[in-house]
Image: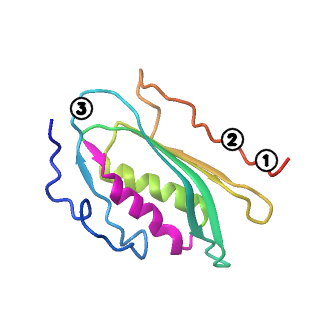
Amino acid sequence: MTTDVSGLSQLGAQTAQPTSPERAVLERVPNPHPDELYLARFTVPEFTSLCPVTGQPDFAHIVIDYAPQDWLVESKSLKLFMTSFRNHGAFHEDCTVAIGKRLRDLLEPRWLRIGGWWYPRGGIPIDVFWQTGAPPEGLWLPELGVPTYRGRG
């Protein structure tokens, strides 16, 4: 089975780091199994963005789960999109939900959820979760596998 990769601008090419999430190009490829119900997971354990007030770096562990329909996200474009937040100032909630909405709009999946486990800012960790609705019946949902922040003790 061959996947149609025509029209992709980043895969197999040297691609500059996007300067912002708005300028990042997210690409998709046809799902070779559009009639199957399954889950695809992307884990970004070293996500970074900037505090919109202080400009200091923020760090998170992001997990994206989605049940594809007609489209899959092209992984190189997703990596570039995720790293485009490194110089982007936004609150934790905004980053997490914006990533989920951008993927939802691009892929039109059966279902999508995103979890953001943010490391403490001002002594308080913030965890942000968003999903498109109830998961489809019969979809296997593995545990997210990211513990809440406990510090060193």
What's the amino acid at mark 2?
Answer: Pro
Of label 3 and label 1, which has the lower sequence position? 3
Question: Label 2 near label 1: C-beta < 8 Å?
Answer: yes
Q: CA distance from mark 1 to mark 2?
A: 8 Å
Element type where label 3 sits in the image: loop
Residue furthest to the right in view is 153
Q: Position of residue 98 (x, y in %)?
A: 47, 59
| 125 is higher (above) or lower (below) than 131 | below
Tag 3: amino acid: His
Residue on which the image places disc 2: 147
Magenta stretch bounds: 71-90
Q: Rate crowding at label 2 as few (under 14), some (14 to 19) or many (20 or more) other CA atoms within 10 Å.
A: few
Q: Which residue is mark 3?
A: 33
- In this rendering, the answer to whether 69 lies above or below 139 is below
Q: Nearer the viewer, residue 90 or 9?
A: 9
x, y percent for residue 111:
40, 37
Answer whether labels 3 and 1 touch (C-beta < 8 Å).
no
